[in-house]
């Protein structure tokens, strides 16, 4: 890797280093901005635009996800001593991050051990590239200087480059549901045989499209054969096996964070979304089912909020009282993108949502204007 110090534009001065590698979405050194080549040959996926209104059903060609009723409530009552979780607009109380998550803001976790190949699991053959456009884009993202800690990830799929700012372990909020979904699909046949396909599919739909916490806990319990703690271990094993080294599930949704919490990073989320995108493009039935769930997302107040009419976004949000996260695939556009934002220790939650929306539009315009 070759580091190039660049000065961040706007109201937030951020020192970032541009790192170049052959392949793999591996976190870099502390405070790095990473720019790397990824596999070539990706084109726009012909998908129907996801409606911003509430969806009542979603289908896939493989039949794994069938028509499912919309739940009556997306989020549980945040009152009480339990740590709240969710993406609703209920003003959830904040969860204080553990000391190791907040120490040294901007630090990146160690690189993944299995990062030698392409981010899409194919052998990387391209030479390292210095993407000056990505460098320019990331340098120009103006995060608020007085509203929490921020990190961001961008993948220009069509241009075969990706980069991140301050990717490190942060509070996942409901982004942890991405990995619950991944673990469920990895064990789909076993779970549907034990609990029934309708139950598994219905809970998947509710967990992703309206961020239902009870559905997330039910699926986690399914993964542990009725034991939530055992189910969390299955999720963590899934994350380790797939190289999501910054991701950890330490509590059920809405449960106390006294002893542990849920964490991920923009890099891990970006890697997850890229695998979903690529698998969907290649006709993989599991990836297509995951893609369709994300495309049926009803939470549209962040990354999708300021996108032009006709632009499709498949995304998953995450919120706590002082956390605003969102990760999405922008598709059916000339230059398809993956964008992930994470923020914590916020003092202005509404302003943070607007920041994510406006910066997402800035990234979209940069590659599609």
Image (spheres, rainbow, N blue to C red):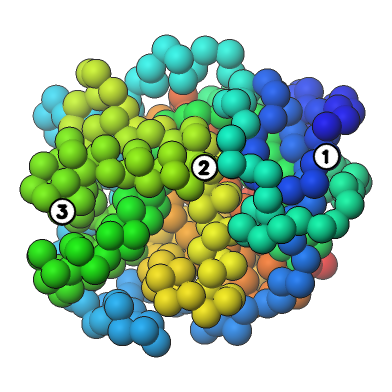
The residue at the point 40 percent across, 71 percent down is: 286
Q: How many marks?
A: 3
Ranked by sequence position, the earlier of labels 3 and 1 is 1
The foreground one among 60 and 152 is 60
Ranked by sequence position, the earlier of labels 2 and 3 is 3
Label 3 crowd (10 A; few <14 / some 14-19 / many >=20): many
Q: Is residue 354 above or below residue 367?
A: above
Q: Quadrant of residue 206?
A: bottom left
Mark 1: secondary structure: loop
How many angstroms separate mark 2 from mark 1 (CA)?
19 Å
Mark carried by residue 222 = 3
Residue topped by disc 2: 243
Where is the C terminus found, in terms of image quarters? bottom right
**Residue 62: x, y in percent?**
36, 84
Q: Quadrant of residue 313?
A: bottom right
Please indicate whether residue 324 sits to the left or right of residue 1 in the image.
left
Mark toward the viewer: 2 or 3: 2
The residue at the point 86 percent across, 43 percent down is: 136
Would residue 306 be visible to someone looking at this image? no
Please indicate whether residue 4 sits to the left or right of residue 367 in the image.
right
Mark 2: secondary structure: loop
């Amino acid at each position: 890797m070759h580091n190039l110090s660049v000065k961040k534009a706007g109201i937030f001065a951020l020192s970032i280093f541009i790192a170049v590698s052959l392949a793999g979405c591996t976190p870099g050194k502390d405070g790095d901005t990473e720019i790397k080549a990824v596999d070539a040959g990706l084109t726009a996926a012909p998908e129907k635009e996801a409606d911003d209104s509430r969806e009542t059903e979603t289908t896939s060609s493989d039949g794994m996800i069938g028509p499912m009723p919309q739940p009556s409530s997306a989020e549980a009552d945040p009152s009480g001593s339990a740590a709240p979780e969710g993406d609703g607009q209920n003003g959830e109380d904040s969860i204080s991050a553990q000391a190791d998550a907040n120490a040294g803001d901007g630090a990146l976790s160690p690189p993944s051990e299995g990062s030698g190949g392409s981010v899409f699991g194919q052998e990387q053959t391209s030479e390292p590239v210095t993407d000056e456009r990505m460098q320019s884009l990331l340098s120009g993202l103006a995060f608020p200087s007085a509203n929490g800690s921020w990190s961001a990830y961008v993948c220009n799929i069509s241009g075969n480059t990706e980069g991140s700012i301050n990717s490190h372990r942060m509070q996942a909020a409901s982004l942890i549901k991405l990995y619950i979904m991944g673990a469920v699909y990895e064990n789909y046949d076993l779970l549907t045989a034990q609990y029934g396909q309708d139950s598994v599919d219905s809970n998947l739909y509710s967990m992703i499209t309206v961020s239902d916490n009870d559905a997330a806990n039910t699926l986690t319990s399914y993964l542990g054969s009725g034991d939530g703690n055992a189910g969390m271990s299955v999720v963590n094993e899934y994350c380790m096996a797939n190289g999501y080294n910054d991701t950890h599930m330490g509590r059920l949704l809405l449960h106390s964070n006294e002893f542990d919490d849920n964490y991920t990073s923009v890099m891990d989320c970006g890697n997850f979304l890229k695998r979903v995108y690529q698998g969907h493009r290649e006709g993989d039935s599991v990836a297509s089912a995951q893609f369709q769930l994300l495309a049926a997302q009803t939470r549209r107040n962040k990354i999708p909020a300021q996108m032009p009419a006709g632009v499709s976004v498949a995304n998953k949000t995450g919120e706590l009282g002082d956390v605003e996260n969102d990760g999405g695939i922008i598709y059916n556009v000339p230059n398809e993108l993956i964008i992930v934002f994470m923020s914590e220790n916020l003092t202005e939650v509404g302003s943070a949502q607007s920041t994510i929306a406006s910066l997402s539009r800035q990234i979209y315009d940069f590659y599609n204007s």
